[in-house]
Image (cartoon, rainbow, N blue to C red):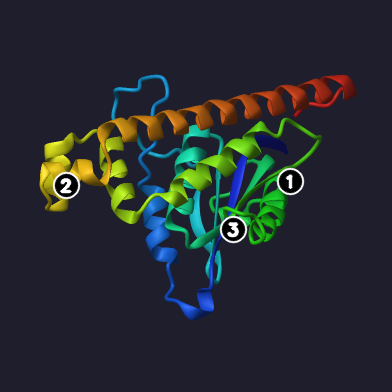
Amino acid sequence: MGAMHGWALTVDQRRSRMSEDLVPGLLRALTRLPVIDVGDPTSPAGSPHWALTPERTAGDEIQAFTTDPATLVAAVWTVCGQRLWWCGIGMGEVRTPLPDSTREAAGPAYIAARQAVDGAKKAPNGVLVELAGPPASTRLARVIDVLAEVASSLTPAELDVCDLYDRGMDRPAIAGRLGISAPAVSKRLTSRRWEFLRRTRALAVDLAAEALSERTVSRSAVSRSTGKGG
């Protein structure tokens, strides 16, 4: 039995007893995320890469697992932008071979995600990162918190325009999709503002990739020193 390094997400609906079930809508959003390509700032966003696809695991809770930094950032952006969820992120290992369902997955990353979602209920922006295993850089946790604050500061109208810009649409096409005028698109979100938001997310992707690389290298070094594979 081996292990895979990445991020487990546990997302819990806020005030679920007083509102409708929002899980189906978020599941659709998470499987259709626009994932930016940090290597090519001019290219349209691609599809998410989930190692274990998002699923309802209990009541109003969703869990998933990814090894892709850009998918992680896109998920945090979407979840926190809705301001309807507590988001816990556990960075660490998941046992391999991976099961068919995230509900059957196990490993330190999932334990850390559970702890994180509980802590997220007291966090300023409703999101928390827990690192499973030895202490590591806190830069990822800080940038995720900033990302969540930026996303939650945008209105639904601004997020709709941002999403369509991410998918490669220009202003006239966005206007047609939303049924508004081209000037109204810019009033909601200028292309310059969108470029800033894209750069912000690209920085978060870079730091997430760096954090995962550091953790993987650290784990490999420990395995070599103890004579264990991993």
Which residue ends up furthest to the right in the rendered image?
A: 226
Q: Is residue 44 left or right of residue 38?
A: left
Q: Mark 1 is on which residue type? A: Pro
Q: Which mark is residue 108?
A: 1
Q: Quadrant of the C terminus?
A: top right
Q: Position of residue 134 (x, y in %)?
A: 81, 35
User: Which residue does the image show at 65% across and 28% down from the upper left?
Assistant: 211
Q: Viewer-proximal residue, 25 or 159? A: 159
Q: Which mark is residue 184?
A: 2
Q: Mark 2 is on which residue type? A: Ala
CA separation, marks 2 and 3? Answer: 44 Å
Q: Is residue 1 left or right of residue 228?
A: left
Secondary structure category for the residue under label 1: helix
Viewer-side label of 2, 3: 2
Q: Which mark is residue 103?
A: 3
* Rendered view: 210 above or below 21: above
Q: Is residue 165 left or right of residue 74?
A: left
Who comes first in sequence, dot 2 or dot 3?
3
Viewer-side label of 1, 2: 2
